[in-house]
C-alpha cells in the first residue's frame, strides 16, 4: 500500500497544576495525597457567603509559565464564571478566564517526526481553579467526593493543532513538562495529576475530507497519550473508509481512553458548544498585571531545556544522547555546568557524571542534590583524566575516595601515588618484558589479532601496577612489534 | 414610659460603657427581649431570637465594663441581623427551606465588626427568600407585618429588620440592599435605611444574591444612629476582594448652598400623590433653608428596572447553584445525581427564587447572552457615567424611595411585574454603585410612613446621612413610634 492518504492533526489542551503553597482563592494548603476533605475551608467548600480572594503567587506562577512558553502576558486580565453542575464542583461554577486570558500567542519547539524542528503554537494559557475529585465506590451506586484538590490553581494551556502524530504529541508533553520544571512553576507529574491532558485528534485526507474532531479524556501518561492517538487515528480512518464519516456528516465528540485496553470509548456528542453561561466573576476585580512583575519573571527565567540540549551538542560536542540525559532535569544540567572548566573537556565531565556518579545515585535511589561533594571536585577529576594524569580505572578509584571521604582528587592521587606512568622509558621496559613473557600472544598481535594481544597489554599494565598510560602502552607495544602506530 | 431602648444609640452605648452608670447591657437586652415577646407574635420580624446568647453576651460585656475595660461605640446596643448574614452558631436560613438546618461556622464580617464595637446580636430577621422580593411575603416562613398596620407589608426584602426597628424591638438592624431592599422597607416602616457605596462594606458572610449589586446597610431610627452602625461595619476586608477604602468623610455640609438634584424621570414615578406631596414638602423645607434646586435628567434611569431584572437574576442563577443538596442544607434523595439536583431545588426554592434563577439562566445562555446580559451590563456602565455626570452638577439627589406607601399583604403577591416596580426608584443607585438612604418624610393621611431618598456620588455616604439629619431638622419629620410600640415599655 502506498503512503497514507491522510495527515494526522492533533491539538492539545493541558491542565497544569501550579506549585503554590496554598490554593488559588483561599488559604488552604494545596497538597496531594492527604486524607480526603481535610484541606478545605468555607471558600473552597462554597459555603454560603464565602468569597474568593486571589492568591498572588498563583498569578505570578501563571505569568512565569506563560513567559516560559513564549507567551505574551496580558496587561489586564479578568475572571469569569464557568457554570455547570457537578458533585465535585461545590459552587456550581468554576472560576476561570474566558475572553481575557492571562497569556496568549506562545510557542514551543520539539523535534518533528521528519527530524526538523517543529514549532507548536500555544493559542492561550489561562488561570482557573481545579475541581474536587469523584471516586466511584466499586460494587455500589455511590460515589465519594474529595474536595482537597478543589480550588488549587491550574493553568490551562491550549495549543494550536500543530502536532502531526502520536509521537509528536508525546514529545510536546515531555517538552512542556521539562519547560515548566525548568521554570519551577509546576511539578508536571502526570501520575499525581499535576499535568493532565486532553488531545484533540482528527485526520485530513488529500481530497480535503476531514474526520470529525474527537477530544480524548482520561489519559494520564505520555505513553497513554500516544496510544490513545494511535488508536484514534486507526479508528477514524476506518470510520471514514468504511462508513464515510466526515466532519460534514458527523458531530464532534468526546471519547474516554481506557488504559487497560488501549482503546477509546464514546462519551458524548458535542452537537453545539457546551453552554457554560460564562459571565464576568463579580466577586473578583479585574487584575492589572504589574509590568515590573512580568519583567522580573522574564529576567529570571532559565534557558529553555531544548535550547540547552542543542547547545550541549553543538558547543560542547556531546552526543545527542548525553545531552538529552543531562538536560532532562535542570538540576542535573546546572550541576554539570558547574563542573565544567577550561582544563577539562565537557565529554569527560559528562562521562564521569552519567557513568560513575549516576550509578552511585541510582543505587541509592537519590537525586543529584545527594552528591556529597561540589561539582567543581568532579571537574578537577575530569581535568586529571584529560591531562592524562590518571587513567580510567584510577579515576574510578579516586571518585570512590571523593564520594566516601571527600578527599580532593589531586590530593588523593598524590597521597596514594596514583598518577599514571607516562615515562617512556618505564613503559618501554614494561612492554619489552611483556613481549618476552608472552611470546605467543605477542606473535598473534603482530599478525593482527588484537584480541590475543590483550594478554600482552595486560602483562605490561600489571608491571606498571595498573597505572600505565593506556595510549602510551599501546603505542610502545606496536612500535616494538614493528606495527604501524 | 421612656425605655433606655429609645435613647439615641450613642447615649445608650456611652451609658453602658460607663461603669458608674446604672444602665447595663443586660437591661437593654432584657428590654428588647420583652418587646420581642410582646410584639413579635403579631409582627413576625424575627426568624430566630438568640435569647440565651444575647443575655450571655450582655453579661460578658457588663463584666468587661465592671473590670474597667474599654468597650466600643455600640456597647450593649441590641442588633437585629437579617437572616442572609452569617452569625456563627445561629441557623442561617435566607428564609428558604433549602438551607434547612445549616449553621455557619463563622460570623459575617459586618456582624463580627458590630459585635467588636459592642453590639449584642438579638436574633435573625425575616426576609424575602434569598432577598428576592419587596414585601417579605416571599419568605418560606411566612410574611412579616408592618408595625404601622399589621394588614400591610413592611416592604422587603429586609422587611424583618425594618419592622424590628420600627416596632422598637431593636434600636439597630442590619439589612442587605441589592435593588432597594434596605431603603424601601425603611420607607414603608418610617425609619432610616442606608445603602452604602458599593465596596464600602464587606460582603463576606452575606449570602450572595447579585454580587455586583449587594451591599449590607444599617437600619436605625435616626441618621446619627445609622451612621454609628455604618462606622462600625465599613472599611476594606481582606475576605472581600471588592471591598475598598474610601477617603475620610466630608464634614457635614450645611444646607446653605447645598445643590439638590431633582430628576425629571423620577418625579411622580408610580404616581401616588401623597408620596409626591411628602417629597415635595421635604424639598421645599431644604430650599427654604438655603439649598438650591438643580433640575436634572437621567434618561437611562428609565432602563433601571429592565437592566436590574437581567443583571440580578443572571448573577443569582450562578450564586444559587451551590444549593444542590450535596454538602449542606436540605436534600431530596434520588438514585441519580441529576434528579437529586432537580428534586432538591424544586422542593427547596420558592416560586420567586425559581422564577429569577430561570430568568437569569436564560439571560446568560448561548445565543441570548449578547442580547440580554451583555447589553444590560453595557447600559449599567453607561448609567454609572450618567450618574457621575449628574453629581458634578449637584451634591445630592432627592427623590421618593418607594412609589407608594405600604400595600396590603397579598395585594401584589400574584403579580410579579407590579412587585418588581416597587424598586423603580431604588435600583439605579445599586446599578451605579452610589450611596443612597431613605429617611422618614411623614405619614400619609391613613397613617402610613413615606420615605424620602437621598443619593450622592460614590463614596459620599456621610453627605447622604448628614443631609438626612438636616432634613429632620428642617422638616421636623422623623421616626415616630407606631401605635403597637406604645403598648409596651
Ligand atoms: Zn479553602
Image: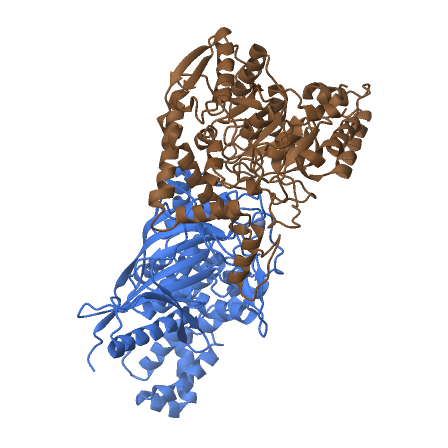
Q: Tell me, what hue is chain A?
A: blue
The answer, for residue A88, to whether it is visible in the render is no
- Quarter occupied by residue B202: top right
Q: Nearer the viewer, residue A70 or A457?
A: A70
Q: Position of residue A62 (x, y in %)?
A: 43, 49
- Left or right, A422 with respect to B179, comes to left
Q: Residue at x 39, y 44 (%)?
A: A299
Chain letter for the brown part: B
- Left or right, A263 with respect to B56, comes to left
Q: Position of residue A466 (x, y in %)?
A: 48, 76
- Quarter occupied by residue A457: bottom left
Q: Position of residue A205 (x, y in %)?
A: 21, 70
Q: Nearer the viewer, residue B357 or B213?
A: B357
Q: Nearer the viewer, residue B252 or A464?
A: B252
Q: Nearer the viewer, residue A167 or A139?
A: A139
Colour basis: by chain
Q: Residue at x 48, y 29 (%)?
A: B426
- Quarter occupied by residue B53: top right
The answer, for residue B365, to whether it is visible in the render is yes
Count of labels shown?
A: 0
- Left or right, B208 with respect to A423, comes to right
Above or below for A395 versus B417:
below
Above or below for B340 versus B396:
below
Split into 4 quadrants, where in the image is the N terminus of chain B? top right
Q: Residue at x 38, y 32 (%)?
A: B303
Split into 4 quadrants, where in the image is the C terminus of chain B? top right
Q: Residue furthest bottom?
A: A440
Q: Position of residue A246 (x, y in %)?
A: 25, 69
Q: Residue furthest left?
A: A207
Amino acid at each position: 500500500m502506498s503512503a497514507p492518504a491522510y495527515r494526522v492533526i492533533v491539538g492539545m489542551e493541558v491542565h497544569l497544576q501550579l506549585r503554590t503553597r496554598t490554593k488559588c482563592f483561599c488559604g488552604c494548603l494545596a497538597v496531594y495525597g492527604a486524607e480526603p476533605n481535610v484541606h478545605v475551608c468555607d471558600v473552597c467548600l462554597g459555603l454560603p457567603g464565602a468569597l474568593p480572594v486571589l492568591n498572588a503567587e498563583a498569578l505570578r506562577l501563571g505569568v512565569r509559565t506563560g513567559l516560559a512558553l513564549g507567551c505574551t502576558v496580558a496587561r489586564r486580565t479578568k475572571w469569569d464564571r464557568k457554570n455547570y453542575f457537578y458533585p465535585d464542583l461545590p459552587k456550581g461554577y468554576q472560576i476561570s478566564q474566558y475572553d481575557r486570558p492571562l497569556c496568549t500567542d506562545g510557542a514551543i519547539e520539539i523535534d518533528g517526526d521528519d527530524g526538523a524542528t517543529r514549532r507548536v503554537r500555544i493559542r492561550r494559557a489561562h488561570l482557573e481553579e481545579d475541581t474536587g475529585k469523584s471516586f466511584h465506590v466499586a460494587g455500589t451506586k455511590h460515589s465519594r467526593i474529595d474536595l482537597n484538590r478543589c480550588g488549587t490553581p491550574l493553568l490551562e494551556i491550549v495549543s494550536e493543532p500543530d502536532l502531526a502524530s502520536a509521537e509528536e504529541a508525546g514529545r510536546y508533553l515531555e517538552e512542556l513538562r521539562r519547560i515548566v520544571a525548568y521554570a519551577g512553576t509546576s511539578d508536571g507529574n502526570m501520575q499525581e495529576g499535576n499535568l493532565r491532558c486532553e488531545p484533540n485528534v482528527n485526520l485530513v485526507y488529500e481530497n480535503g475530507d476531514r474526520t470529525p474532531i474527537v477530544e480524548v479524556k482520561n489519559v494520564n501518561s505520555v505513553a497513554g497519550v500516544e496510544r490513545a492517538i494511535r488508536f484514534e487515528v486507526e479508528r477514524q480512518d476506518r470510520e471514514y473508509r468504511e462508513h464515510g464519516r466526515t466532519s460534514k456528516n458527523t458531530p464532534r465528540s468526546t471519547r474516554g481512553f481506557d488504559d487497560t485496553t488501549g482503546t477509546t470509548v464514546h462519551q458524548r456528542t458535542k452537537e453545539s458548544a457546551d453552554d457554560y453561561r460564562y459571565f464576568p466573576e463579580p466577586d473578583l476585580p479585574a487584575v492589572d498585571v504589574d509590568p515590573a512583575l512580568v519583567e522580573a519573571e522574564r529576567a529570571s527565567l532559565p534557558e529553555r531545556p531544548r535550547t540547552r540540549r542543542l547547545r550541549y551538542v553543538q558547543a560542547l560536542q556531546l552526543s545527542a544522547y548525553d545531552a538529552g540525559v543531562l538536560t532532562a532535569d535542570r538540576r542535573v544540567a546546572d550541576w554539570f555546568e558547574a563542573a565544567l572548566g577550561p582544563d577539562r573537556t565537557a565529554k569527560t565531565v559528562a562521562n564521569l557524571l552519567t557513568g560513575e556518579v549516576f550509578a552511585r545515585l541510582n543505587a541509592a535511589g537519590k537525586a543529584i542534590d545527594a552528591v556529597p561533594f561540589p561539582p567543581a571536585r568532579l571537574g578537577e577529576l575530569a581535568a586529571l583524566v584529560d591531562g592524562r594524569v590518571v587513567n580510567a580505572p584510577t579515576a574510578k578509584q579516586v571518585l570512590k575516595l571523593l564520594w566516601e571521604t571527600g578527599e580532593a582528587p589531586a590530593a588523593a592521587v598524590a597521597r596514594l601515588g596514583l598518577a599514571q606512568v607516562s615515562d617512556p622509558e618505564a613503559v618501554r621496559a614494561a612492554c619489552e618484558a611483556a613481549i618476552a613473557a608472552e611470546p605467543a600472544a605477542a606473535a598473534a598481535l603482530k599478525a593482527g589479532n588484537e584480541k590475543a594481544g590483550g594478554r600482552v597489554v595486560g602483562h605490561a599494565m600489571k608491571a606498571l601496577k595498573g597505572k600505565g598510560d593506556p595510549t602510551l602502552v599501546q603505542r610502545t607495544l606496536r612500535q616494538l612489534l614493528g606495527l604501524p602506530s | 414610659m421612656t425605655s433606655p431602648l429609645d435613647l439615641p444609640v450613642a447615649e445608650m452605648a456611652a451609658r453602658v460603657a460607663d461603669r458608674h452608670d446604672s444602665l447595663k447591657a443586660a437591661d437593654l437586652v432584657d428590654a428588647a427581649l420583652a418587646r420581642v415577646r410582646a410584639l413579635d407574635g403579631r409582627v413576625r420580624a424575627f426568624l430566630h431570637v438568640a435569647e440565651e446568647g444575647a443575655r450571655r453576651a450582655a453579661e460578658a460585656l457588663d463584666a468587661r465594663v465592671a473590670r474597667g475595660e474599654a468597650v466600643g461605640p455600640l456597647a450593649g446596643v441590641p442588633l437585629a441581623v437579617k437572616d442572609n448574614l452569617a452569625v456563627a452558631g445561629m441557623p442561617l436560613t435566607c428564609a428558604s427551606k433549602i438551607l434547612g438546618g445549616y449553621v455557619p461556622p463563622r460570623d459575617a464580617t459586618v456582624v463580627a465588626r458590630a459585635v467588636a464595637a459592642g453590639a449584642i446580636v438579638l436574633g435573625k430577621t425575616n426576609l424575602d427568600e434569598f432577598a428576592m422580593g419587596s414585601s417579605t411575603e416571599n419568605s418560606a416562613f411566612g410574611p412579616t407585618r408592618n408595625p404601622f398596620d399589621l394588614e400591610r407589608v413592611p416592604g422587603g426584602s429586609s422587611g424583618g429588620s425594618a419592622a424590628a426597628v420600627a416596632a422598637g424591638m431593636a434600636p439597630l438592624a442590619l439589612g442587605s440592599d441589592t435593588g432597594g431592599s434596605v431603603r424601601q422597607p425603611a420607607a414603608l416602616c418610617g425609619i432610616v435605611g442606608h445603602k452604602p457605596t458599593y465596596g464600602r462594606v464587606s460582603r463576606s458572610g452575606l449570602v450572595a444574591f447579585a454580587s455586583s449589586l449587594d451591599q449590607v446597610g444599617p437600619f436605625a431610627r435616626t441618621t446619627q444612629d445609622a451612621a454609628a452602625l455604618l462606622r462600625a461595619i465599613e472599611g476594606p476586608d481582606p475576605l472581600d476582594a471588592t471591598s475598598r477604602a474610601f477617603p475620610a468623610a466630608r464634614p457635614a455640609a450645611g444646607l446653605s448652598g447645598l445643590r439638590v438634584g431633582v430628576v425629571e424621570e423620577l418625579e411622580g414615578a408610580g404616581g401616588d400623590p401623597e408620596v409626591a406631596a411628602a417629597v415635595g414638602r421635604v424639598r421645599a423645607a431644604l430650599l427654604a433653608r438655603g439649598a438650591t434646586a438643580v433640575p436634572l435628567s437621567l434618561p437611562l434611569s428609565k432602563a433601571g428596572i429592565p437592566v436590574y431584572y437581567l443583571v440580578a437574576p443572571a448573577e443569582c442563577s450562578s450564586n444559587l447553584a451551590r444549593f444542590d443538596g450535596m454538602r449542606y442544607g436540605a436534600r431530596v434523595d434520588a438514585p441519580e445525581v441529576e434528579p437529586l439536583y432537580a428534586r432538591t431545588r424544586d422542593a427547596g426554592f420558592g416560586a420567586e427564587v425559581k422564577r429569577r434563577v430561570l430568568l437569569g439562566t436564560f439571560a446568560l445562555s448561548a445565543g441570548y447572552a449578547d442580547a440580554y446580559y451583555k447589553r444590560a451590563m453595557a447600559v449599567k456602565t453607561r448609567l454609572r457615567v450618567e450618574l457621575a455626570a449628574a453629581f458634578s452638577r449637584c451634591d445630592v439627589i432627592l427623590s421618593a424611595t418607594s412609589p407608594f406607601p405600604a400595600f396590603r399583604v397579598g395585594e401584589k403577591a400574584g403579580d410579579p411585574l407590579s412587585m418588581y416596580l416597587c424598586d423603580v426608584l431604588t435600583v439605579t443607585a445599586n446599578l451605579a454603585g452610589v450611596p443612597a438612604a431613605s429617611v422618614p418624610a411623614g405619614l400619609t393621611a391613613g397613617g402610613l410612613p413615606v420615605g424620602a431618598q437621598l443619593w450622592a456620588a460614590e463614596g459620599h455616604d456621610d453627605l447622604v446621612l448628614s443631609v438626612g439629619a438636616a432634613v429632620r431638622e428642617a422638616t421636623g419629620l422623623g421616626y415616630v413610634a407606631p401605635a403597637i410600640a406604645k403598648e409596651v415599655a
